[in-house]
Image (tube, coloured by chain):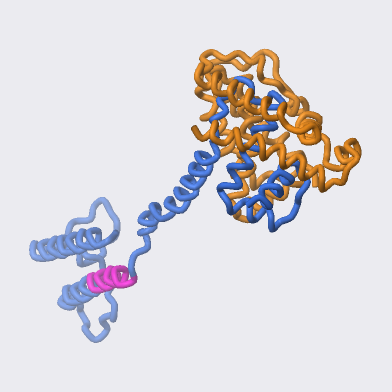
Chain colours: A blue, B orange
Amino acid sequence: MKEYSQDLSSLMDNELGDKEVINTILDDTVLQKQFSRYQLIGDVLRDESNGLDLRMDITDNVMAAIANEKQDDYVAPLAAAPEKSNVVPFMKRFGQYAIAASVAGVVVVSSLMVNQGSSTDPSVAPVLNTVPFGGAAAPVSLQATPLQSENEIKERNERVEALLKDHQLQLQTQP
Amino acid sequence: MNERELDLQLIQRIQNGEQQAFALLVRKYQTRVANILTRYVRSSGDIPDVSQEVFIKVYKSLPNFRGDSAFYTWLFRITVNTAKNYLTSQSRRPPASDIDAEEADSYDGSGALKDDANPEAILHSQEVKQVILKVIGDLPDELKSAITLRELEGMSYDEIAQIENCPIGTVRSRIFRAREAIDKQLKPLLEN
């Protein structure tokens, strides 16, 4: 111990640069406290401690505060992690696409079935009918009169309702 | 190795993750920081808290320290800025006369005003000072001379060796023995 105490004294006077000795001092709390007292001797002799409470040693508090702050730095990203849950799991996303595709399929098939009856020549019916839900596309005109029967309107309303329900279902399944 | 080089070595260690090296810097400079703060912080009870704030700021800013100036000059600036921020937070104005970094080393804060110096702390400090001076007074002349030339005159071991006409190793040993003798009396006083 005495050997290092002399090194400590030399280190304080900037007369020692041996890294191994510095390593030993940094690892030894007793030597560090001795360093504080040696420092205090010089401070008192130079009158640099006038009016100060000489029992004051803030080293432990400072080091504890620094350790706490470091810990907070590590905790912060962990706490923030749940915010990254915007990433939708693959199966969930896949399920949404499947629902959307089946709804689209139902709409297309039902449109085809509705329009099959009105087709004048079934042999030239298009594979994918793009006629709107209304059943027929009428030219835009202020004088146009509705060509739909009551049944057609009822069917259209039912399909719209079904679509709305599917849409609501999709909204519920989204994150 | 001079003080600046030693500080730089400790700072490099801190920057490489050796946190304990910062503890040594705190131990080395805490009294000087507190001494500067007495100029600004009138309530002596607040000095430990403000000192702590200073060192935490220093630690956080260390990655930006490039060593262009001496560590103590840099520490001094942070201390003064922290003290001024403290005064602002207390709705008080900084003192009319300021102190420069150049005079920081020789700054004597004993003239600073203190509102509520703790009588117990003052008594204790006086006791510590008396013990140190008494032990030094009782030391053999060669030890007394060595510690005085080092601590009061700031001489290097080489300079003291020339004055005392003895090898550097002897100077090293004399200064250590003087400190050891003082520490023997000082330690129980500080621990109690």
Taking the view exactly as shown, the residue that stands out farthest to the bottom is: A123
Query: Which residues are the magenta region?
Result: A90-104
Q: How many marks?
A: 0
Dividing the picture into quadrants, the one containing residue A106 is bottom left
Percent across and percent down for residue B15 are 64, 52
Dividing the picture into quadrants, the one containing residue B2 is top right
Closest to the observer, B158 or A170: B158
Is residue B110 rendered magenta in the image?
no
Closest to the observer, B192 or B105: B192
Residue B88 in view in this figure = no
Percent across and percent down for residue A29 are 56, 48
Residue B62 located left or right of residue B143: left
* Residue at the image point whose x is 60% and y is 55% from the top: B17
* Residue at the image point whose x is 30% and y is 72% from the top: A91
Which secondary structure is most common in the magenta stretch? helix
Percent across and percent down for residue B94 are 62, 17
* Residue at the image point whose x is 31% and y is 68% from the top: A93
* Residue at the image point whose x is 66% and y is 37% from the top: B181
Dividing the picture into quadrants, the one containing residue A132 is bottom left
- Image vertical order of residue A97 relative to residue B89, above or below: below
Residue B20 in view in this figure = yes
Closest to the observer, A18 or B177: B177
Percent across and percent down for residue A20 are 69, 58
